[in-house]
Image (spheres, rainbow, N blue to C red):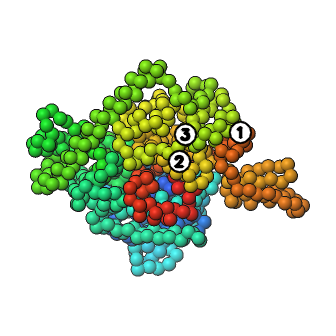
């Protein structure tokens, strides 16, 4: 039995009190336990259950996991492990299954404290998922029998029952997220698929299947990677041009911990570094990442000096050494400490030492044995270093110039009166005529307008030195006022809502993607901080007599149309496809797209760095075939392409 389980008997009083308040607390403040009640929280439910199955795989008892999205957006997770223990224990009078699903365990990912430990406290999140589900069913195949237990909103609705016989073992959990809790109830196959693929990469040899059974959306995939994180890196670079043929892989162990790193450089200017601790994505980095970065920088500098590729006192910075790298760092340890704002930063300092020593030692050996690969990487870093120097000069030029000109704002900017950034918003508008309407329609107290026009620089194909001083991007940089790249500082933002307003057509989508690429590559905290939005112009205008209404989707068009037709059912409703932003008059634009009371804004979020990188690499990068495939694959979701 897992260690953490004993706390129920050892600290009976304390934990029982927690039990009583536990699941109610989860329903009262779900955000504390799953981050949010939007789409990301919804998907988090699935990860919690899958994590338990993966723990069973890590323990060596399970090699097959399935995730099924059912009709009505239910989720079923199946594993072929030992099955959660179902027998009644003497001390507690209940089963482990019941405890796991009804007792709020300490140390959840968002609740503070240490997180579960491989081989230690299992099933931490199961009770949270249960509390937030309209209903949940657990079936355990074990000892030749199928046991079943049912819950509703965390309460038991059916105690453990034997419902059949079986010759298999394993656990199956099915649940329906509670509509009283979540704002969003529709699962994204792509989001789950990406996550499951990531878990398959991180657990070499584990088979993970995913299936979407919702009518009209049927899809499935099966993933199993013998090469583990090596194959992850190959996957990350699949739409890019690698600088060397083979993925570089190093690994090592020390006492109870192990670390592995896989990396391969490509000819882009971007760094894609993903780190994990106990299979959990450490978005905020931490000690293992720090150890990797310092080892990489040192190995490259040492090798460069030794081989005279670096002359005299030439020195490569960490960023130089990581230009064009795709890398995975994965560590497994007992007693992982998660810190930071989203509890996704690894705090264990011994992991820095471990990763640093493994990478220093084994990467230098690799370079000795593969001088041509080492040469290609060094050359790339030296070029990066020179470009960065040029960028620094360009940046200083801008600084000096703006100092001379008294920090002048771009001429095209129509600023607002309010100066508190928390209260203001800037509309970045495509085209001068739409800009004109926006200027006329806005509420000048808090809304600023910046029109963009002409062809914009595609930053995916440019290095930093091209971005500084670019005449299309400079107005955006100065209007936002928060700098760029390493210098970016969200505290200096002049507006806390940055709203991209472009037409709902292909051109609009293009300009939106260009801007988002720019933000993602050069002002990432702007997106991560949730400051970026896309305005949603209406898709339809409906008129009947004097009544004018707008609709933002096909469904809404139909319901508004029915409403306008009213009881009598006669009379014609005129439905027109929406015009371009530039053709709307200021009043129309205000009413449909800018008035905070009535407009629809979509916050731009990338909950997944891998997918974001894919979208930008594929949409804006150099290879044509992947782009065509991507667009074909996503054509039906065209409206949401950029999220
Ligand atoms: C679809 C979700 O939860 N699988 C799962 C969970 C457990 C076990 C096996 C398990 C663990 C242990 C012993 C042990 C859990 N057990 C517990 C607890 N899949 C899913 N598969 N036997 C079975 O850790 O010693 C929590 S999770 F606490 F009851 F042991």
Residue 387 on image: x %, y %: 29, 39
Residue at the location (19% across, 46% down)? 378
Residue at the location (71% across, 39% down)? 586
Give the mark, 3 or 1, whose residue is nearer the N terminus: 3
Q: Residue furthest front?
A: 454
Instruction: Pick the residue in front: 260 or 484.
Output: 484
Residue at the location (65% across, 37% down)? 436
Side of 638 where 306 appears, left or right:
left
Instruction: Pick the residue in front: 603 or 191.
Output: 603
> Which type of secondary structure does the marked residue at label 3 adopt?
strand
Marks 2 and 3, how far apart at CA: 11 Å
Q: Are marks 2 and 3 in contact (CB under 8 Å)?
A: no
Side of 629 where 63 appears, left or right:
left
Position of 335 relative to 59 (above/below): above
Task: Tell me the quadrant of the picture where the N terminus can be found.
Answer: bottom left
Residue 98 on image: x %, y %: 48, 60
Residue under circle 2? 512
> Which type of secondary structure does the marked residue at label 1 adopt?
helix
Marks 2 and 1, how far apart at CA: 21 Å
Residue 198 on image: x %, y %: 38, 59
Q: How many marks?
A: 3
Badge 1: how crowded within 10 Å, few (<14), some, or many (20+)?
A: many
Position of 93 relative to 375 (above/below): below
Residue under circle 1? 586
Residue under circle 3? 452
Give the mark, 2 or 3, whose residue is nearer the N terminus: 3
Residue 598 in sight in this render: no
């Amino acid at each position: 039995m897992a260690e953490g389980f004993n706390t129920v008997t050892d600290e009976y009083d304390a934990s029982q009190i927690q039990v009583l308040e536990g699941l109610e607390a989860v329903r009262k403040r779900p955000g504390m336990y799953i981050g949010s009640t939007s789409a990301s929280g919804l998907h988090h439910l699935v990860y919690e259950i899958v994590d338990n199955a993966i723990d069973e795989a890590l323990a060596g008892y399970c090699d097959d996991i399935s995730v099924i999205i059912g009709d009505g957006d239910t989720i079923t997770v199946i594993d072929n492990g030992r099955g959660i223990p179902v027998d009644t224990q003497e001390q507690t009078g209940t089963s482990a299954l019941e405890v796991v699903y009804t007792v709020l365990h300490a140390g959840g990912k968002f609740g503070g404290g240490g997180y579960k430990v491989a081989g230690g406290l299992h099933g931490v999140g199961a009770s949270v998922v249960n509390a937030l589900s309209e209903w949940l069913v657990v079936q355990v195949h074990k000892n030749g029998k199928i046991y079943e237990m049912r819950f509703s909103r965390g309460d038991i609705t059916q105690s453990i029952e034997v419902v059949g016989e079986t010759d298999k073992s394993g656990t199956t959990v099915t649940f329906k997220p509670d509509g009283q809790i979540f704002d969003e109830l529709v699962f994204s196959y792509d989001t789950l698929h990406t996550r499951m693929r990531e878990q398959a990469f991180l657990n070499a040899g584990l088979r993970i299947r995913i299936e979407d059974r919702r009518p009209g959306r049927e899809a499935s995939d099966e993933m199993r990677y013998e090469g583990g994180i090596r194959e992850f890196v190959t996957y990350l670079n699949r739409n890019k041009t690698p600088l060397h043929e083979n993925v570089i892989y190093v690994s090592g162990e020390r006492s109870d911990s192990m670390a592995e790193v896989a990396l391969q450089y490509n000819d882009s200017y971007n760094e894609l570094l993903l780190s994990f601790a106990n299979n959990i994505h450490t978005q905020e980095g931490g000690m293992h990442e720090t150890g990797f970065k310092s080892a990489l920088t040192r190995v490259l500098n040492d090798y460069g000096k030794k081989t005279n590729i670096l002359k005299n006192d030439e020195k490569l910075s960490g960023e130089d050494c990581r230009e064009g790298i795709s890398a995975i760092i994965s560590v497994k340890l007992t007693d992982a400490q998660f810190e930071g704002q989203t509890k996704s930063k690894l705090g264990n300092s011994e992991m820095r030492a471990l990763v640093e020593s493994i990478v220093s030692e084994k990467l230098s050996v690799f370079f000795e044995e593969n001088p041509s690969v080492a040469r290609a990487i060094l050359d790339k870093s030296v070029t990066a270093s020179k470009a960065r120097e040029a960028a620094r000069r360009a940046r200083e030029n801008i600084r000096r110039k703006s100092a001379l000109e008294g920090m002048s704002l771009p001429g095209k900017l129509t600023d607002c009166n309010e100066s508190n950034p928390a209260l203001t918003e800037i509309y970045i508008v495509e085209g001068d005529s739409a800009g004109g309407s926006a200027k006329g329609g806005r509420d000048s107290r808090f809304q600023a307008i910046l029109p963009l026009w002409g062809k914009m620089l595609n930053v995916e194909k440019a290095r930093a030195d091209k971005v500084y001083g670019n005449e299309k991007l400079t107005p955006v940089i100065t209007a936002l006022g928060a700098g760029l790249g390493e210098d970016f500082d969200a505290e200096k933002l002049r507006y806390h809502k940055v709203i991209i307003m472009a037409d709902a057509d292909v051109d609009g989508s293009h300009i939106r993607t260009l801007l988002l690429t720019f933000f993602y590559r050069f002002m990432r905290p702007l997106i991560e901080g949730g400051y970026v939005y896309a305005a949603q112009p209406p898709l339809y205008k409906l008129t009947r007599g004097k009544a004018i209404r707008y609709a933002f989707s096909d469904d809404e068009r139909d319901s508004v149309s029915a409403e306008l037709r009213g009881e009598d059912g006669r009379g014609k409703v005129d439905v027109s496809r929406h015009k371009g932003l530039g053709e709307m008059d200021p009043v129309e634009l205000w009413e449909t797209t800018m008035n905070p009371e009535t407009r629809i804004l979509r916050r731009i979020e990338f909950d997944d760095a891998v997918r974001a990188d894919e979208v930008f690499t594929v949409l804006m990068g150099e290879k044509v075939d992947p782009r065509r495939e991507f667009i074909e694959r996503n054509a039906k979701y065209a409206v949401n392409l950029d999220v």
